[in-house]
Image: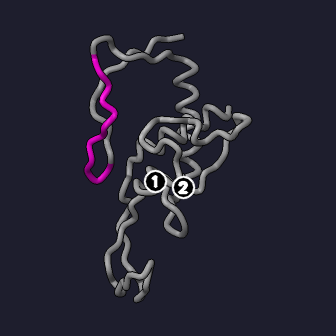
């Protein structure tokens, strides 16, 4: 199952649905990276900057499950992979979401074979709003 886990993780990395995280406020005056941030300043995380950082990912703009596989083909965790945010403000539903993603993904691919609709090009660029939403598209799902 290492490759399956790698595909799920790479899908999350590339399809980052909440690129800017939720806004927070500084609870005290602080200097961060040489910048002074006064108490009460609204801040947000930019998770996309980490998930597409050229210093962290060999091919940041290409879907590549190999980002999560070691030389022996075993799954490896990456510190730069944080689609659920990090630290004290990490998503409370992360563990449930990971289990659900695995179950949905494996069940769907076990029961169906997916393919593009002939003559239609899949657009992988999302629509950016509060979340990153995929554009509408059609696919064939054929029962196995």
Q: Are marks 1 and 2 in contact (CB under 8 Å)?
A: yes
Q: Is residue 127 above or below residue 120?
A: below
SS assignment at label 1: loop
The answer to if 115 sits in the magenta stretch is no
Residue density around tag 1, few if under 14, some if 14–19, many if 20 or more, within 10 Å? some
> In the image, residue 144 lies at what x, y percent?
54, 10
Question: Distance between the Cα atoms at labels 1 and 2?
Answer: 8 Å
Q: Nearer the viewer, mark 1 or mark 2?
A: 1
Q: Looking at this rendering, what residue extends furthest in the bottom direction?
A: 29
Q: Secondary structure at mark 2?
A: loop
User: Residue 81: percent from the left, percent from the top?
Assistant: 54, 52
Q: Main secondary structure of the magenta part?
A: loop
On the rendered image, what quadrant is the N terminus found in? top right
Side of 105 relative to 37 (left or right): right
Residue 80 shows which numbered tag? 2
Image height of 82 relative to 13, above or below: below
Q: Residue 24: where, in percent of width, then height? A: 38, 72
> What range of the chain is rendered magenta?
120-131
Q: Position of residue 13 (x, y in %)?
A: 47, 45
Residue under pointer 1: 53
- Note whether 90 is above or below 3 in the view shown: below
Question: Does label 1 or label 2 sit earlier along the sequence?
Answer: 1
* Residue 129 within the segment the image draws in magenta: yes
């Amino acid at each position: 199952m290492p490759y399956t886990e790698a595909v799920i993780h790479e899908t999350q990395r590339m399809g980052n649905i909440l690129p800017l995280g939720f806004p927070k406020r500084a609870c005290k005056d602080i200097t961060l990276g040489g910048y002074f941030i006064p108490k009460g300043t609204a801040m947000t995380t930019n998770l996309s900057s980490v998930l597409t950082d050229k210093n962290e990912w060999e091919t940041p703009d290409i879907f590549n499950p190999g980002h999560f596989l070691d030389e022996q083909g075993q799954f490896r965790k990456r510190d730069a992979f944080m689609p659920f945010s990090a630290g004290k403000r990490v998503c409370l539903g992360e563990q449930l979401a990971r289990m659900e993603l695995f179950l949905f993904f494996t069940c769907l691919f076990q029961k169906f074979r997916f393919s593009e609709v002939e003559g239609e090009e899949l657009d992988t660029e999302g629509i950016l709003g509060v979340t990153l939403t995929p554009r509408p598209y059609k696919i064939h799902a054929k029962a196995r």
